[in-house]
Each structure stands twice: as C-alpha cells, then as structure tokens.
Amino acid sequence: MEFNWLGKTLLIFGLILAACGLFLMFLPKIPFVGKLPGDIYVRRGNFTFYFPLTTCIILSILLSLIFYLFRK
C-alpha cells in the first residue's frame, strides 16, 4: 500500500495550519485590519454591531488570487 499521497496531504495541511497560526498571531499588530473605510461599525448603548465588509472583500480577493496561483 502506498502512503505517499497521505504524507504529502498531511504536509500540506500542516503548512496551511502553520501559516494560519502565524497570521492569527500577527493579526493584532496590523493596524488597518478591521478599520478600513467601508467596514460597518455601529455602537448604541450596550449594543455593538461590527461587520468588516471591506476587509472581507479584500481577503476574498487575496485568497482567490492565491488559490488561482496554486492551481496553475
């Protein structure tokens, strides 16, 4: 039985997980994430609503570009 594909798959998932961990570790130090023009932030009394619309669009474009480049 060949386990070569399993090793490659686990390695790729491990690298992706490590990259996500590094991203989450340094996310608070990036000043513009979540504070871009177009991000919706409503605060009224004890109610706060936050929807990072522009941030989601930029992340979607970046991820689409990364996945497109990996597919090539």
Image: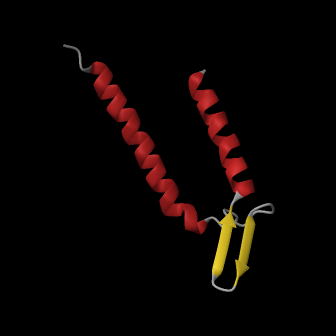
Q: Position of residue 69 (x, y in %)?
A: 62, 28
In x, y percent, where is residue 14?
A: 37, 41
Query: Which residue is the extreme one toward the left?
Result: 1
Q: Quadrant of residue 46?
A: bottom right
Spot occupied by residue 51 in the image (x, y as percentages of width and height)? 68, 62
Residue 55 percent location from the top left of the image = 70, 55
Counting every numbered tag in the picture gives 0
- Name the foreground residue: 60 vs 4: 60
Residue furthest right as drawn: 37
Looking at the image, the residue that sits furthest to the top is 1
Corner quadrant of residue 64: top right
Q: How is the image coloured?
A: secondary structure
Q: Residue at x 70, y 41 (%)?
A: 61
**Hey, which quadrant is residue 11 in on the image?**
top left
Identify the residue at image location x=71%, y=78%: 43
* Residue 56 in the image: above or below residue 36: above
Which residue is painted at 29% across and 25% down in the image?
6
Judge whether 46 appears above or below 12 on screen.
below
In the picture, the quarter occupied by the N terminus is top left
Q: Nearer the viewer, residue 69 or 49?
A: 49
Q: Quadrant of the C terminus?
A: top right
Vertical side of 11 occupied by 62: above or below: below
Position of 14 with respect to 34 (left or right) is left
